[in-house]
Image (cartoon, rainbow, N blue to C red):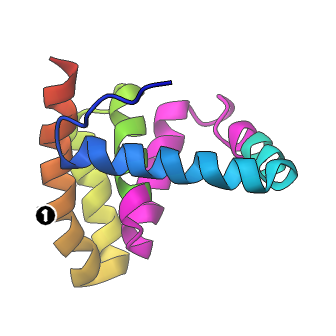
């Protein structure tokens, strides 16, 4: 399968993550299958909506400074219909716990990625 050329840095990061996950899955198929099943179950609609779960995952990613997960779950938030205001409010709550490190990711990576992901929708 031929991979398209990424259109911006955010899409390139998503491609890198998916490529790495694919290689890991080839090398450790049993582990990857169980991990994927677990995470799919965690993100299914339940008492919390998938949008709410993505916002939580985004906040945790931001707090833990995991750039790939920040982008991945930011995309999940947008895909589940979260508004930019909801995402930025989640940034505020995360920054209340994560301080300057969380805020620095928000004013750089998050704002750039929101623009990139919105551009990809057009």
Q: Main secondary structure of the magenta part?
A: helix
Residue projecting furthest to the front: 2
Q: Inspect the magenta stretch and tell me whether residue 46 lies in it.
A: yes
Left or right, residue 16 beside residue 33? left
Foreground of the two, 117 or 89: 117
Identify the residue shown where x is 70% and y is 46%. Answer: 39
Whole-percent x, y for residue 98 in the image: 34, 79
Can see residue 13?
A: yes
Determine which residue is flagged by label 1.
Answer: 108
The C terminus: image quadrant: top left
Q: Inspect the magenta stretch and tell me whether residue 45 lies in it.
A: yes
The image quadrant of residue 81 is top left
Whole-percent x, y for residue 54 in the image: 48, 43
- Asked if residue 31 is positioned above or below residue 19 in the image, the reply reads below
The image quadrant of residue 53 is top right
Identify the residue shown where x is 70% and y is 43%. Answer: 42
Identify the residue shown where x is 73% and y is 44%. Answer: 36
Residue projecting furthest to the bottom: 100
Identify the residue shown where x is 67% and y is 31%. Answer: 44
The image quadrant of residue 47 is top right
Label 1: how many Cα within 10 Å (few below 14, some 14–19, many 20+) = few
Whole-percent x, y for residue 18 in the image: 50, 44
Residue projecting furthest to the right: 30
Foreground of the two, 16 or 38: 16
Foreground of the two, 81 or 20: 20
Per the image, label 1 sits on a secondary structure element best described as helix
Whole-percent x, y for residue 119 in the image: 13, 28
Give the magenta range: 39-68
């Amino acid at each position: 399968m031929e991979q398209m050329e990424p259109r911006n840095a955010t899409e390139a990061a998503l491609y890198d993550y998916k490529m790495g996950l694919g290689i890991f899955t080839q090398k450790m198929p049993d582990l990857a299958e169980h991990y994927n099943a677990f995470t799919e179950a965690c993100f299914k609609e339940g008492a919390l909506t998938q949008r709410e779960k993505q916002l939580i995952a985004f906040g945790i990613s931001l707090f833990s400074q995991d750039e790939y997960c920040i982008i991945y779950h930011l995309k999940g938030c947008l895909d589940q219909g979260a508004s930019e205001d909801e995402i930025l409010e989640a940034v505020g709550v995360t920054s209340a716990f994560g301080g300057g490190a969380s805020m620095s990711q928000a004013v750089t990576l998050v704002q750039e990625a929101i623009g990139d992901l919105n551009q990809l929708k057009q």
